[in-house]
Amino acid sequence: MVRVEDAPYPRVLGIREELRERGRAVVAMDVDPRVHMNAMGTVHGGAIASLVDSAAGRAVASLVGEVARMSTIELKVNYLRPSAGGTLRAEGRVVHAGTRIAVVEVDVSQEGSLIAKALATYYVAGGADRDGRPARIHPPGHGGVPPLVGLKSAGSL
């Protein structure tokens, strides 16, 4: 099994998990000018997109459990203001969880100011859950899983 926290790419960028709970995750990255900056002296959009993908993936992983194959199938980032350094935080919240598809909203902030807003879509392709059953997203209200406020499952749309 591959675990989200074992992925090497986020570690290379210095992305760390600060919180993971059902349908939500927060990750942070201390900006390193040698790694994260573009030629204009601001944080590269790709570094912010990677932070977004890490928060969103962990939010989905909180609903799926340990899964071998989970993939980002769409990622859209609106960059609202530049960042020149410091610590960036991304909070991902699952806003839709179907059987195989999840949609996650992500806010990226720095010192309380919103610098990017994103939407990510994930596909759970396979693997097994903790009980050995084929992996599926477990939206609230299904199989004894307690509901999350504001989370919509495929059956509630």
Image (spheres, grey):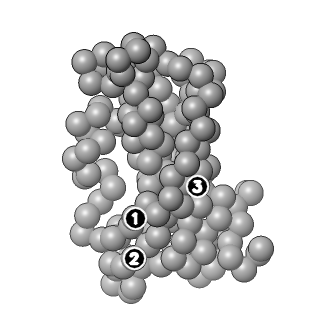
The reply to whether discs 2 and 1 touch (Cβ–Cβ < 8 Å) is yes
**In the displayed structure, does residue 8 sit left or right of residue 92?**
left
- Evaluate whether residue 82 shows in this view: yes
Residue at the (65%, 64%) spot, across then down:
96
The reply to whether discs 1 and 3 touch (Cβ–Cβ < 8 Å) is no
How far apart marks 3 and 2 lie (CA) works out to 17 Å
Return the residue at label 2.
125
How far from the left and from the top, in percent, is residue 62? Answer: 48, 59
Q: Secondary structure at mark 2?
A: strand
**In the displayed structure, does residue 62 sit left or right of residue 111?**
left
- Evaluate whether residue 148 shows in this view: no
User: Tag 3: Cα neighbours inside 10 Å, few (<14), some, or many (≥20)?
Assistant: many
Please tell me which residue lies in front, 20 or 49: 49
Closer to the chain start, of discs 2 and 1, is: 1
Return the residue at label 1.
71
Residue at the (33%, 25%) spot, across then down:
36
**In the displayed structure, does residue 146 sit left or right of residue 8?**
right
The correct choice, above or below, for 149 with respect to 8 in the image is below
Return the residue at label 3.
104
How far apart marks 1 and 3 lie (CA) works out to 13 Å
